[in-house]
Amino acid sequence: MRALVWILLGLLAGSVATLSILNALRPATAFPRGVMAVLQHHLGAANEAVSQGRCDAASARHFEALALLAEDVVPAFAPLAGEDEVFARYAAQLVETTRAAQGTTDACRNAAAQLGAIKDACKACHRDYR
C-alpha cells in the first residue's frame, strides 16, 4: 500500500513538472494567436460582405484592417520569420496581396477576386506552418 502511494505521488509530481516545462516552452505572449484571430475575423467579415453584394465602406474597412494586420505577421512570429526564408516570403506575399486589395470594393467582382488571392496567401502559409 505504501509503495502505491509513493508511485501515485511520483506520477503527480511528474505530471506537474511536465506541465511546467510545456508552459515554459510556449510563447511568452498571446500576440501571434491574437494577430491570427483578428485576421480571421476581418477576412470572414469581408468575405460575408462581398458574398452578399455589400461592397461599401464597411467592407472597405475590413480590407484596410487586413492590410494593416498583415504587416504584424512578421513581428508576431519574429523568431520564425527571421530564420525561415519561406515564412518570410509567405508573409511578404500576404502583405502585397492585402495592399493590392485595398480600394477594390468599388466592384464586388474585383473584391471577390482579391479575397480569393488573400485566402490563397493564407492557405499557402498554413499548409506549411500550421
Image (cartoon, grey):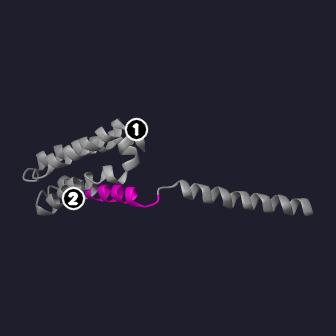
Residue 113, x across and y down, in percent? 17, 43
Q: Residues within 10 Å of mark 1 (few under 14, many from 20)?
A: few
Mark yes or no: residue 1 visible. no
Image quadrant of residue 68? bottom left
Q: Residue furthest top?
A: 86
Q: Verify whether residue 83 appears in magenta.
A: no
Q: Main secondary structure of the magenta part?
A: helix
Q: Residue at x 34, y 36 (%)?
A: 85
Q: Residue at x 9, y 53 (%)?
A: 103
- Residue ID for mark 2: 65
Horizontally, is 120 left or right of 27 in the view?
left
| Disc 2 residue type (three-letter) | Ala
Horizontally, is 25 left or right of 78 in the view?
right
Q: Residue at x 18, y 53 (%)?
A: 50
**Nearer the observer, 52 or 88:** 88
Mark yes or no: residue 59 visible. yes
- Residue ID for mark 1: 128
Label at residue 103: none
Residue 29, x across and y down, in percent? 43, 61
Horizontally, is 61 left or right of 130 in the view?
left
Query: Magenta region: which residues?
Result: 28-42
Horizontally, is 58 left or right of 80 in the view?
left
Dot 2 lies on which element?
helix
Which tag, 2 or 1, sits closer to the chain's start? Answer: 2
Dot 1 lies on which element?
helix
Q: Verify whether residue 32 appears in magenta.
A: yes
Image quadrant of residue 33? bottom left
Image quarter (top left, top right, bottom left or bottom right) of the C terminus: top left
Q: CA distance from mark 2 to mark 1?
A: 24 Å
